[in-house]
Amino acid sequence: MSKLNSNTLAIQIFALTKRFDSLIAVNGIDLGIGKGELFSLLGPNGAGKTTTINMLCCLLKPTSGTVSIMGYDIMKEPFRVKELIGVAPQETTISEHLNSWENLSLIGRVHRIGSKELKQRSEELLETVGLLERAKDRVGKFSGGMKRRLNLIMALVPDPEILFLDEPTLGLDPQSRRAIWDYIAELKGKKTILLTTHYLEEADVLSDRVGIIDEGKIVALGTTDELKKSISETNTMIISAENLSAEAIDGLRTSDRYAEIDNVSGKLKVSGKDLNFREVIDYLYSQDVTIYSAALEQPTLEDVFLKITGKELRE
Amino acid sequence: MRFLELCKRNLKETYRDPLSLGFLLGFPLVFMLLFGLAFSGETTPTYSLGVLDQDQSEISQAFVDEALATAFEITPYDNSSQALEDLKAGDLRAYITIPQGFGEQVYQNWQGESENIALDITYDESDLIVKEQVISMIDAVTRSFARIEVPVTLNTSPIHIESEITYIDFIAPGIIIFGLLILIPTSARMMVRDKEKGVLARLLTTPTRPWEFISSYSLCLFAVGIVQIIIFIVIAYLMGMDIVGNAGLVFLVFALTALCSIGIGMIIASLSKSENQADPLSWLIAMPVAMLSGCWFSIEMMPPWLQSIAHAFPFSHSIEASRGILSRGTGFEAVASDFLFLVIWTVIVFAAGILLFRRKMTI
Ligand SMILES: Nc1ncnc2c1ncn2[C@@H]1O[C@H](COP(=O)(O)OP(=O)(O)OP(=O)(O)O)[C@@H](O)[C@H]1O
Ligand SMILES: [Mg+2]
């Protein structure tokens, strides 16, 4: 079992705990992330995402628990681990008086990347995030979002096997965010990626699996579909239509297959465990209802997030 | 080499920041000029000097009237007891006895033969002005009068004084060492700033080793230190400091001193979380050590127990060694023990710096 794990898992976390004085920031996390997997860690502010990542990248000493990365224990062989990882921290950290090339080459060089490869990779990355034209400017003069983009590609320049991206798209405009999503999507399967984000759409689109962490504990884990299914057993469809008669609606109500039927401002909402899309449409046609649109409503990752972390309730 | 790449980055961060560059280079410049001017001002007051001319030759007469009179207020005496009384009363700063044969000795020098010139100076031992200034002035005046390059033998009583030391020669090494002590806060600041901004944390996720971090900062700071030393020496030289001994040797003393300071700065940076912690801490160390090491006044005036504490630090050794080399032309053998002390200190502070960095900064 453990042999199998060490062959397929890039990151293995056992009972990882971090305590700051009285505050338990990370509370006994167990998690395995497969090689080539893109795993998103979601959670409200202060949940312990950054603290977890800091421990994984050998910056912070765990209070207890162990982590191994590609088979290397972070406490026993930190330098082996550091050779394998690329980290984009949540806080933008760049050398203000250097330009983008120099910032990238610094990280590349300390990872002992050859100068030819370094130049080529830097150029490619700068192009991806749209910084190539400004690459010779001092980064101190960059806008916040431009700094963020550089901060991200500095993690990518050594071409590491494992990437830790702490809110990689924080504070970016929609185009840049999209460009970065596309880039990350390209890396999928080739690199093991652990990212945190507050853009749940991003996690939904990109991730193989997500983990939701709250108050230092993983409270939900699985593929996005699994999580969505887990919070709702019922299916809901929304129909917008003309001449919806009261009889037609009542006809639906007589069936015990539909748990809930609402008609609010011309939009009919039908939900039920065994809801059949086709059946409802056919029925409404038979009642001479003109249907403009009809769609099955899926719970979003946001619904999952809110439900699981209970932020709705706390507020 | 990883640390060279990091050092390159540190250098760029330094010289591209006009403010920090201005501080690093402008500071020693202004500092040395200020000290130089402050102390050169002290040569202006004229001191009263008693003269007892036992030679009574034409040359000795000329020496008193044309040479000594330009630098001092002269009071002639016939016998030493009267002069001694006036010295005790404070009317005289010192009195000088021109021995018989003085004129002959000077004449020989004018003829191109190197004859030693002897003069007797009597002064109050506790009078530091005489100790550090009047004697050197007499020395300078005598040498220019007799046109000699060889040291004048000044038989001072009650204590014998090295004849060649002028005031700037005495004060400059201490001031330069103080300038190099200021590398402690400078060094601490450079590293702790990166720590505070998270740049160091980011680099700590790369395979860079603790010694590589320490050497990258130190190398950059050492370059800064070398430039500072050159500025110090050039200005001191322009202000009249003699370089009698081997300039390379004294440079080496200063360079080792700079390394000691940098190492201490690295230790402080490893121990502090922010610039706000590191800065006061490094000044708190630099200032008392400067005082104790004799940067501003001779440590011979301190009680012996304090002197032994002072000698435990490298900086009093740097001052003594550099003073010896600069003004007396002391050779390497004579300062070898000071050198050894500096080297040992350098090795220890760097080892401690790396160890602390490893313990404090990495898991
Ligand atoms: N150095 C520290 N000292 C003390 N407490 C800390 C420290 N770093 C983090 N914490 C605490 O640990 C908890 C988790 O913080 P963490 O930064 O991991 O949250 P996060 O999930 O990354 O949040 P966000 O979404 O806001 O980035 C917080 O309560 C925080 O106050
Ligand atoms: Mg965070």
Image: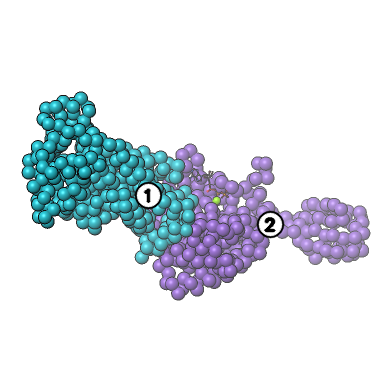
Chain colours: A purple, B cyan
Classify 10 Å Cα crowding around label 2: few (below 14), some (14-19), many (20 and above).
some
Disc 2 is placed on an element classified as: loop
- Identify the mark at residue A300; answer none if there is no mark: 2
Mark 1 beta carbon near ligand 1 (under 8 Å): no
Q: Is residue A257 left or right of residue B303?
A: right
Answer with the quarter of the image where residue A90 lies.
bottom right
- Identify which residue, A77 or B298, lies in the foreground: B298
Identified at 41% across, 59% down, the residue is B11
Where does the image place residue A149, in percent across and percent down from the top left? 57, 61
Q: Chain of mark 2?
A: A
Residue at coordinates 23% horizontally, 45% vertically from top-left? B166
Q: Is residue A97 visible?
A: yes
Mark 1 surroundings within 10 Å by alpha-carbon count, few (fewer than 14), some (14 through 19), many (20 or more): many
User: Is B150 placed above or below B132 here?
Assistant: below
Q: Is residue B235 left or right of residue B334?
A: right
In the foreground, B180 or B94: B94
Provide residue A183's location: percent of width, then percent of height. 58, 68
B161 to the left or right of B237: left
Query: Could you give the CA–CA distance between mark 2 and mark 1, rounded to whole angstroms?
Result: 64 Å
Chain containing mark 1: B
* Residue at mark 2: C-beta within 8 A of ligand 1: no
Task: Give me the residue at 55% from left, 66% from top.
Answer: A135
Residue B188 visible in the shown view: no
Question: From the image, which quarter does the N terminus of chain A lie in?
Answer: bottom left
Residue B363 location (% of width, % of height) = 39, 51
Quadrant of the image containing the C terminus of chain A: top right
Please tell me whether mark 1 sits on a helix, a strand or a loop. helix
- Looking at the image, do the residues carrying marks 2 and 1 touch, with CB atoms under 8 Å apart? no
Q: Amino acid at mark 1?
A: Pro
Q: Residue at x 45, y 45 (%)?
A: B274
List the residue tagged with mark 1.
B28
Task: Give the amino acid type for the residue marked by disc 2 in the picture.
Answer: Thr
